[in-house]
């Protein structure tokens, strides 16, 4: 499932984050953290993870995503990898087609996180750069994603994806992975649809015997499928 999460950050929050990310000494060649397949296609810069700025921004991104009403329902998070930040510009323009590693080791928490769901949070406005589309190849075909600053997209960690070359300007984004309580993308999708339709039914008709019963069905499915 590919899902947009609008307005994770306000424009003011994006501006404050961008001000902190403007320091050139914070950025390193993205190839330092790429696996053997990805290193051949990865041409971007990444925020050095060890700086105090990086730590503060990581916490801010996680808190913002977690307070978004759709995030829990769509991702059913069990744990999140600490958010990373990347930058693309004509000198470091693209990240060719790749699949992210299935399990990521967090230096911070010393935990392994399985990458069931990927999240990209855009921190540049679409008109600040040319190209730089997050392109996701999934079973429904190819999706091109370029969202306003402060908006995010969730997509299956299992998908082949790439960032097309930036030919003008700079594209800054944060991204991270989520290990979900429900490992299967298909099951997560069913739960999300049920949850969203229940919400709409409640808004239209208030609480009824049927919405109460279907809420029970939602929780019983989640109980059957979730690992905590
Ligand atoms: Ni990737």
Image: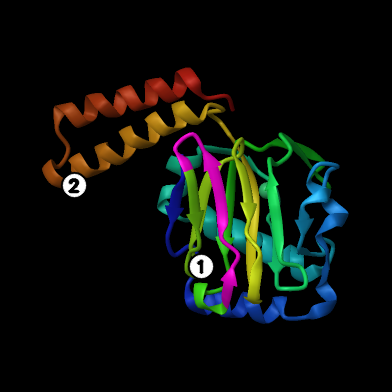
* Residue 130 drawn in magenta: yes
- Which range is magenta? 129-141
In the displayed structure, would residue 115 be above or below residue 48? above
Q: Which residue is label 2 attached to?
A: 203
**Left or right, residue 134 beside residue 52:** left
Q: Which residue is label 1 attached to?
A: 150
What residue is at 51 percent from the left and 48 percent from the top? 154
Task: Give coordinates of residue 21: x percent, y percent.
Answer: 71, 75
Q: Main secondary structure of the magenta part?
A: strand
Task: Check disc 1 and report its element: helix, strand or loop.
Answer: loop
Task: Give coordinates of residue 111: x percent, y percent.
Answer: 78, 38
Quarter of the picture containing the C terminus is top right
**Left or right, residue 49 beside residue 19:** right
Task: Check disc 2 and report its element: helix, strand or loop.
Answer: helix
Q: Pick whichever of labels 1 and 2 is earlier in the sequence.
A: 1
Figure colour scheme: rainbow
What residue is at 77 percent from the left and 52 percent from the top? 41
**Is residue 49 or residue 66 the one in the foreground?**
49
In the displayed structure, would residue 70 be above or below residue 20? above
């Amino acid at each position: 499932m590919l899902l947009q999460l609008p307005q994770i950050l306000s424009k003011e929050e994006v501006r404050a984050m961008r001000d902190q990310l403007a320091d050139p000494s914070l950025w390193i060649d993205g190839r330092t953290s790429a696996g053997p397949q990805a290193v051949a296609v990865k041409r971007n810069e990444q925020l050095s993870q060890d700086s105090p700025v990086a730590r503060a921004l990581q916490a801010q991104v996680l808190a913002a995503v977690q307070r978004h009403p759709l995030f829990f329902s769509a991702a059913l998070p069990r744990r999140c990898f600490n958010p990373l930040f990347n930058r693309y510009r004509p000198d470091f323009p693209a990240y060719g087609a790749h699949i992210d590693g299935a399990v990521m080791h967090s230096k911070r928490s010393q935990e392994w996180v399985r990458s069931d769901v990927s999240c990209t949070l855009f921190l540049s406005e679409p008109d600040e750069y040319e190209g730089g589309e997050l392109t996701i190849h999934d079973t429904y075909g190819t999706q091109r994603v370029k969202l306003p600053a402060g908006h995010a997209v969730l997509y299956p960690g299992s998908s082949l994806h790439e960032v097309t070359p930036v030919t003008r300007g700079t594209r800054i984004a944060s991204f991270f992975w989520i290990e979900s309580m429900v490992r299967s993308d298909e099951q997560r999708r069913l739960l999300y649809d049920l949850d969203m339709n229940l919400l709409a039914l409640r808004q239209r008709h208030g609480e009824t015997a049927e919405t109460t019963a279907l809420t029970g069905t939602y929780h019983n499915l989640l109980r059957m499928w979730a690992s905590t």
